[in-house]
Image (spheres, rainbow, N blue to C red):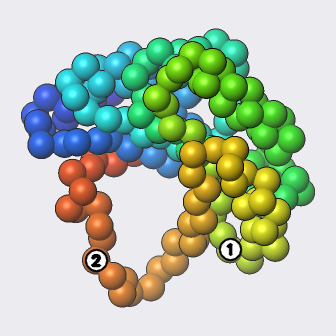
């Protein structure tokens, strides 16, 4: 709900950045670009994770204009596992991300562009290729261990970073 998003931003001036629309494709939200701009205009940095399926030329342009701070694209193993997990072609994603990087560079935009892979039994075989393909191309290459239902051994760092995670359904 856009009103809820604005209220959370307005009522929490200590927030430094928002990881918006986590656990859902943010570019599907009809007010996405407007809400990112709202946060940016209030001094709040915004970061998103995307599967890249909505990385159209128009959305790439809007991403460069809305004030987004960082976008991370999810890569799930090799072409076969990515297709199985995302039902989307990895070569298309790679082409679109590289095009987006070129457009960002040409525009002189400060937007950071990253890739990440959730590492588990289905994807770990592709980790060396993933890192070799993206290192030096994007701003950051991340390996993220799959979440497991076990007792935490380290405290959650997000509580101390001034961040806020808003899930696709508005839960904070």
Q: Secondary structure at mark 1?
A: loop
The tag on residue 155 is: 2
30 or 52, nearer to the observer: 52
Q: Nearer the viewer, residue 40 or 122?
A: 40
At which x and y percent is residue 41?
Answer: 25, 19
Question: Residue 104 at what x, y percent from top left?
Answer: 59, 24
Label 1 Cα neighbours within 10 Å, binned few <14 / some 14-19 / many ≥20 = some
Q: Say which residue label 1 marks.
A: 120
Observer-nearest residue: 113 or 86?
113
Mark 2 Cα-neighbour bin, 10 Å: few <14, some 14–19, many ≥20: few
Residue in view at x 52 percent, y 72 percent: 147
Per the image, label 2 sits on a secondary structure element best described as: loop
Q: Position of residue 67 (x, y in %)?
A: 40, 22
Outermost residue to the right: 80
- In the figure, 54 relative to 52: above or below? above
Which quadrant of the structure image shows residue 159? Answer: bottom left
At x 74%, y 27%, the residue is: 99
The numbered mark, 1 or 2, whose residue comes first in the sequence reads: 1
User: Residue 154's quadrant in the figure?
Assistant: bottom left
Q: Is residue 72 above or below residue 161?
A: above
Query: Looking at the image, which residue is at 57% across and 45% down?
Result: 139
The quarter of the image holding the N terminus is top left
* The label number, if any, that marks residue 90 in the structure image: none
Count of residue discs:
2
- Can residue 172 be seen here? The reply is no
User: In the figure, is residue 19 to the left or right of 14?
Assistant: right
């Amino acid at each position: 709900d856009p009103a809820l998003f604005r209220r959370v931003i307005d009522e929490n001036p200590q927030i430094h950045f928002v990881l918006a629309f986590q656990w859902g494709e943010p570019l599907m939200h009809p007010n996405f670009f407007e809400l990112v701009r709202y946060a940016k205009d209030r001094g709040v940095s915004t970061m998103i994770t995307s599967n890249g399926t909505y990385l159209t030329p128009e959305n790439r342009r809007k991403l460069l204009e809305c004030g987004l701070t960082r976008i991370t694209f999810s890569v799930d193993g090799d072409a076969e596992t990515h297709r199985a997990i995302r039902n989307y072609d990895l070569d298309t994603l790679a082409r679109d991300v590289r095009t987006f990087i070129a457009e960002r560079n040409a525009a002189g935009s400060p937007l950071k562009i990253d890739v990440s892979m959730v590492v588990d039994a289905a994807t770990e075989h592709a980790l060396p290729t993933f890192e070799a393909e993206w290192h030096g191309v994007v701003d950051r290459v991340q390996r993220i261990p799959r979440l497991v239902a076990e007792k935490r051994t380290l405290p959650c760092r997000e509580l101390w970073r001034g961040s806020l995670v808003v899930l696709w359904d508005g839960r904070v």
